[in-house]
Image (cartoon, rainbow, N blue to C red):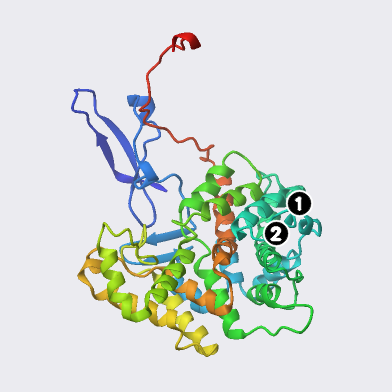
Amino acid sequence: MKLADNKATLSFSNGSASIDLPVYRGTVGPDVIDIRKLYAQTGMFTYDPGFLSTAACQSAITYIDGDKGELLYRGYPIEQLATTCDFMETCHLLLYGRLPDIAAKAEFTQRVTYHTMVNEQMQFFLRGFRRDAHPMAIMTGLVGALSAFYHDSTDIHNPEHRDISALRLIAKMPTLVAMAYKYSAGQPFMYPKNSLSYAGNFLHMMFATPCEDYVVNPVIERALDRIFVLHADHEQNASTSTVRLCGSSGTNPFAAIAAGVACLWGPAHGGANEACLNMLEDIQAMGGIAKVGQFMEQVKDKNSGVKLMGFGHRVYKNYDPRAKLMQETCKEVLASLGLENDPLFKLAMALEKIALEDDYFVQRKLYPNVDFYSGIVQRAIGIPVSLFTAIFALARTVGWIAQLNEMIGDPEYKIGRPRQLFSGSTRRDVLPIAQR
């Protein structure tokens, strides 16, 4: 971050003296106006609900250009990473700022693999939940509970503790998600297998049983690995901001990530792919492709209450670059499983065609986002809809940890303390109860 050539001058119409505010320039993206001394100089705060125009931190991890439809991890385009690198390489990049060579990748993968098992007592903790509990309710509890089982690495200000916590979280999230699934399905838990890849091991823990050998389908393995890469980080979104805010208090990494899991659960955030697949199934129940036009007309009608899920994005005002990659993966998986004529996929393609051609959707820049196709892929793999968001949390954990570690290492970081525009009652006195 460096000072820009210009300053911002804030003037007031009531005759108060104007003030100059520093302007900082990042390597790419909009400049930012430094308002840290605004209150001291004017007695006023800024008002920005949803933080739509506020940079709460400086970061060197992920950059999004919504107008171009560009997503960069540490400067590398997501299209290149998703086609050239696997999830372990991506994790190394996000955590340490560089892509690993062969030796560094082998070492990092070995360190992650070493931590994939969880304490046996976690099983007893898990059994305290109802069998029909939502997986995200279970995951919020399990991730938070990690700090009770691995309290030797909970000092967020100790770099070694942060590093081992990062490895533990990345390694154990697939184990926890698979345990949550097996528990709800009434099946025995499957232990990790160190001979398998990160994605392959997750598939094994999800779908293997003690009764027979399970062979990982390489096409599905690659597809799942790509899902992890595409969801690994996404700049200062709601859950990442939650992790940063929670971590700013000095709480342990497991608690901060549990807060991120809880935030991700919301249907406007991580639950979007679940909502998208539910929408496709509702259209299918209405009559399938024959009803697509009618459904899209309902979407246009503001009074209908019908929403188009999986289209549009808070940041992207162009085609989500992750959606193109996910569509390719979707075709590969369906072809591998003999599901080329899958009715939901055909339905999705029909919806996308209308959205890309109809002026109503084109003018509003409602392009498909990554959630639109990832739900179809996960459904084809055999992952239940209720588990979609938990898999999102699994993939996003590395991004959360990278962002948390970056914040702790920033000498300018302080405990988060947003301000408010108070609109309640002014000071008043409490009357005795008989006089109220």
Specify the label residue 168 is tagged with: 2
Q: Disc 1 residue type?
A: Tyr
Res 357 seen here: yes
Using the image, determine if residue 384 lies above or below residue 122.
below
Left or right, 423 with respect to 216, comes to left
Seen from the viewer's position, the closer of residues 165 and 179 is: 179
Using the image, determine if residue 120 lies above or below residue 335.
above
Mark 1 sits on what residue? Answer: 150
Local SS, label 1: loop
Q: Position of residue 349 (x, y in %)?
A: 36, 80
Q: Position of residue 344 (x, y in %)?
A: 43, 79
The residue under the point 67% across, 65% down is 184
Local SS, label 2: helix
Seen from the viewer's position, the closer of residues 409 and 394 is: 394
The residue under the point 48% across, 80% down is 329
Res 97 seen here: no
Seen from the viewer's position, the closer of residues 249 and 183 is: 183
Q: Position of residue 38 (x, y in %)?
A: 36, 31
Sequence-wise, the earlier of marks 1 and 2 is 1
Q: Quadrant of the C terminus?
A: top left
